[in-house]
Amino acid sequence: MILLATNWSHVWMVTLLGFGLVFLLLVVLIYVLKLFGLIMHPRVKVENPQDVHKSVGTQRKETSEKISLTGQATAAIAMALHLYYNGVHDEEPTQVTIKKVERRYSPWNSKLYGMNNLHRD
Amino acid sequence: METNIWQEVLEFFQTMGFMQMGADFLGTGWQQLVMLLISFFLLYLAIKKQYEPLLLLPIAFGMLLTNLPGAGMFHSELWSAFLDPQSPAYHSYGAILKEGGLLDVLYIGVKAGVYPCLIFIGVGAMTDFGPLIANPKSLLLGAAAQIGIFLTFLCANALGFSEAQAGSIGIIGGADGPTSIFLTSRLAPELLGPIAIAAYSYMALVPVIQPPIMRALTTKKERAIKMKQLRSVSKTEKIVFPIMVTTVVALILPDAAPLIGCLMLGNLMKECGVVDRLSKTAQNELMNIVVIFLGLSVGATATGASFLNLKTIMILAMGIVAFGCGSAGGVLLVKVMNLFTKEKMNPLIGSAGVSAVPMAARVSQQVGQEENPGNFLLMHAMGPNVAGVIGSAVAAGILLSMLG
């Protein structure tokens, strides 16, 4: 009875037209975005891969001649990367505080045994 | 004198909620008791399990307040009169302000469609549309994931719901709480409580619902696909994007303008960089205040009479179907697109098309890393994810224009 009471032609129309419209509107947006991207972010001209290889090869030679890292610098960079990626680097709390720091008692910092006390006597 | 004191005490006892509940226990009393228990359970889920606590907690508490006998904080009969053309209080907010309780007054914001739009301003201010601008094809996935809405619309019609009710139930598949509330308050306000609860519950259950569907529809090889890094997006593009989307969408579909317009307004405030104070307010104070009002008033609509019936169970069941179909739709569209394109996409990002920002994108990342720990899909999945927000708002606008 329920199935018969429903206006199925309208239901199907809403379903198909509705979903189609969602798609259509978002496809329109895709094209608008692509056009927008072309205007705002023009593509960099890609060179011919063979030319690129040649130029990269010559550049590599030049840079390897110019840049010469010492073993110590390389080790320092490697260590920094290791500490950064493994989260080993200790982080300072970076909090400035005016709270009094309580020092635990020790005979080594006691005024009683300080040199000044001897002078007072 | 003695008689008067006893009479006063007796009258006081009669005003107690316990007495009111007990007096008509077989009528509405048991329904109120069950609703109170449900609200306790939802509070437990929000606090202990942390299922969307920011919204589930006020919703559950609104449900608790509205089902307290004698508290008179929400009057569903006033809202029935508000919708009845024969009633003298038809469409009269004055009658609500005069006779309503606190939750009735707060509910005006839902009824007028104000809260969902204000929330969308905050959502926009917190969203980065960069991945979508960098890869506009993501919009297709956002569209495909809306198939859940329309399939559920068909199912709900077959189960005897009216077309307006079926549209409101279907929108759960958009996995977007404010959109669901916006559309339901316009099309089927009587179902607002169950639909809001279903929408937010399933959004919280994204990490449980989606992964089995994603794994079932993809092969190991597909899940391990690595995608090309997205291009960088300039600040100007990010500023022009919200203005352009609002103009295009509102000109094609004016009914979607309130939601899309507010979403893009929030985003423009964030991206333009000249109204930082407004952007921060939209992200924090405005959003938080509206969430409290929205949650409380939506929870208040879940009275025993409107919630405890077969329809609610059917809505909850169809909600999960809507959500599952939407997730599957996105994944399947990526697979189809991969047949025709050179640069393969990972099908896992398709499921993020069902809005639920950013949870759905995180799920794509998580499932992708299970197959290939070196695969970072998060930014790729954010494209369809934010496209899903636009897609569900557009679907809501279409349903509103066709069924409203």
Image (cartoon, coloured by chain):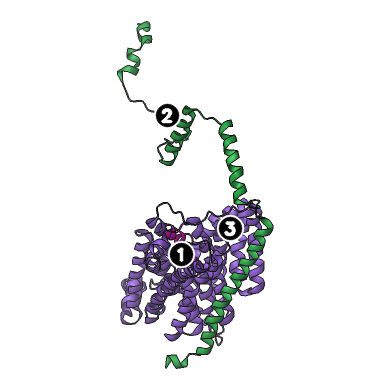
Chain colours: A green, B purple
Q: Tag 3: residue type?
A: Ala
Q: What secondary structure is marked by label 3?
A: helix
Mark nearer the N terminus (1 vs 3): 3
Dot 2, how many residues are within 10 Å of its Cα: few (below 14), some (14-19), or many (20+)? few
In the image, residue B106 above or below residue B155: above
Q: Are marks 1 and 3 in contact (CB under 8 Å)?
A: no
Q: Are marks 2 and 1 on the same chain?
A: no
Considering only vertical position in the picture, is B242 above or below B187?
above
Residue under label 2: A100
Helix, strand or loop for disc 1: helix
Q: Label 3 belongs to which residue?
A: B134
Q: Which element is circle 2 on?
A: loop
Image coordinates for residue B11, horizontal then vertical, percent: 35, 74
Residue at 47% x, 64% y is B352
Q: Is residue B109 visible?
A: no
Query: Which residues make up the magenta segment?
Result: B347-364
Q: Nearer the viewer, mark 1 or mark 3?
A: 1
Q: Amino acid at mark 2?
A: Lys
Query: Residue B118, image x and y in percent?
Result: 57, 64
Q: Which residue carries the number 1 mark?
A: B347
Residue at position x 35%, y 70% in the image: B38
- Residue A75's image quarter? top left
